[in-house]
Amino acid sequence: MQWVDQIWKNLLRNHAHDSIGGCNSDATNRDILHRLEQTEQLSHSLWNLVVKELATASCEEGDLFVINPSATAWSGIIKATLYSRTAGIELSHHARPLPFSVLERTQISGGRTVQVTVQGEKEVKTSALLPLAGRY
């Protein structure tokens, strides 16, 4: 709740002077813009934290988490970037397969790591596991 309080305080600080009527200085306008930018950043951070907590509480390994933030039901196409160790993936909802299209497929190198050996340091390829963000 501390974040929500801070977000509201930042918003309300912008209404405490003559900025509503447009009769304030450039410095005041810069302060207002800065507070609005801070408020937007805090809002995005809070959103990310809430979604992460929801996904962590309701998902298992390999699940894709999709959330509808609106107050009404939504139907449409979801565009998402998925990372998988295998070429073939399946999507399902309540054990029913979901149709999907792969728009682009890119092989991503697992990266490189440095191993210390008797002969010195040696750079080798390594694989990295990038888990999905949640559940669908």
Image (tube, helix red, strand yellow):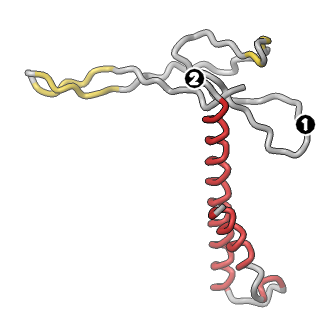
Q: Position of residue 76 (x, y in %)?
A: 86, 30
Question: Which residue is located at x 62 percent, y 66 percent?
Answer: 38
Q: Is residue 136 above or below residue 50?
A: above
Question: Which residue is located at x 69 percent, y 74 percent?
Answer: 9
Question: Which residue is located at x 69 percent, y 18 percent?
Answer: 102
Q: Is residue 110 above or below residue 87?
A: below
Instruction: State which quarter of the image contains the N terminus.
Output: bottom right
Report the residue marked by disc 1: 73
Q: What secondary structure is found at the residue carrying circle 1?
A: loop
The one nearer the camera, 35 or 62, is 62
Question: What is the spatial separation of the Cα atoms under label 2 and label 1, in whole angstroms?
Answer: 27 Å
Q: In terms of sequence position, does the residue under pointer 2 or pointer 1 come before the other?
A: 2
Q: Is residue 32 above or below residue 129?
A: below
Q: Position of residue 113 (x, y in %)?
A: 29, 27
Q: Position of residue 71 (x, y in %)?
A: 88, 46
Which quarter of the picture shows residue 19? Answer: bottom right
Report the amino acid beneath label 2: Glu
Report the residue marked by disc 2: 61
Q: Is residue 106 above or below residue 75?
A: above
